Image (cartoon, rainbow, N blue to C red):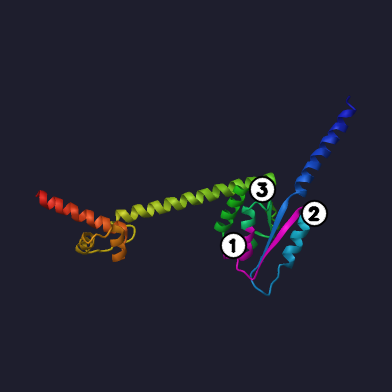
Amino acid sequence: MKAEEPKQAELNTLLIVSLFRNVEDSMRVGIYARVSTRDQDCTLQLTELRSYCKARQFEIVREYVDQGVSGSLDSRPELNVLMADARRRKLDTVLVWRFDRFARSTRHLLLALEEFRELGVAFVSYMENIDTTSALGRAIFTIVAAVAELERNLICERVSAGIRNARAKGKRLGRPSRYVDIDRIAALKASGMSLRQIASELDCGYGTVRERLQSSERKTLHKNAA
């Protein structure tokens, strides 16, 4: 009985290795590469990323290459296609050579990583050795999500503080009110026009017309009551 235990352990190990190999074989990868100028090329990036996929037996679904496109732009032709394919669940992993090839700003990177996390798409940065298919990578994703949430909360707090400060100084928020002659409104209303037709005629908002009429009616009632 004891002699059979090592054999069973070996079988279990082989089964686990086989399962992981099958998972990696089915991994659909989108490679993203970018250079900033037209006289550069992505050969180095693509060569190393292809070798990485071959070593891990990943299936390359497509190579998304932005040639001569600044990394400071959040919107790039091939990057937009990659994001669309990820949203359509065509990719399991996004593979880049370095973080700065994918995103130049921390904000852009955090937003993209947060979206990948929600989509269940892994992200691998070859040079930084960051792989969210690993336990450490998943932990990094959790940290990234926490930082993204903190950033959103800080923005909300700054906006709220700014509004409170503006109101405390007596500043009126929103669009400035447009003056509309109440006599002109009354004349148009008397002619049978609806409030929306009056607003269109005077090139102002429906709410403005209604507010001016209600204000005029309140003044008339107050005057008559006095």
> Disc 3 marks which amino acid?
Gly
Q: Position of residue 33 (x, y in %)?
A: 68, 63
Q: In the image, what residue type sits under mark 2?
A: Ala
Find residue 217 and report its horizontal and vertical position in percent: 19, 53
Residue at x 29%, y 65% (from the top left corner): 201
From where the camera sits, is residue 37 visible? yes
In percent of width and height, residue 55 lies at 80, 54
Tell us which disc is closer to us: 1 or 2: 2
The extreme bottom residue here reads: 39
Q: In this view, does 201 lie to the left or right of 86?
A: left
The one nearer the camera, 141 or 181, is: 181
Packing grade of label 1 (10 A; few <14, some 14-19, many >=20) is some
Say which residue appears at 61% left-offset and 57% top-offset: 84
Q: Residue 137 carries which label?
A: 3
Residue indicated by mark 2 = 55
- Label 1 sits on residue: 104
The span from disc 3 to disc 1 (Cα, nearest Å) is 20 Å
Name the element at disc 1. Answer: loop
Is residue 50 found left or right of 185 in the rendered image? Answer: right
Range of magenta residues: 54-82
Q: Residue 56 carries which label?
A: none
Element marked by disc 3: helix
Q: In which quarter of the image is the N terminus?
A: top right
Element at badge 2? helix
Crowd rating for badge 2 (residues with CA inside 10 Å; few <14, some 14–19, many 20+): few
Q: Which image quarter: residue 177?
A: bottom left
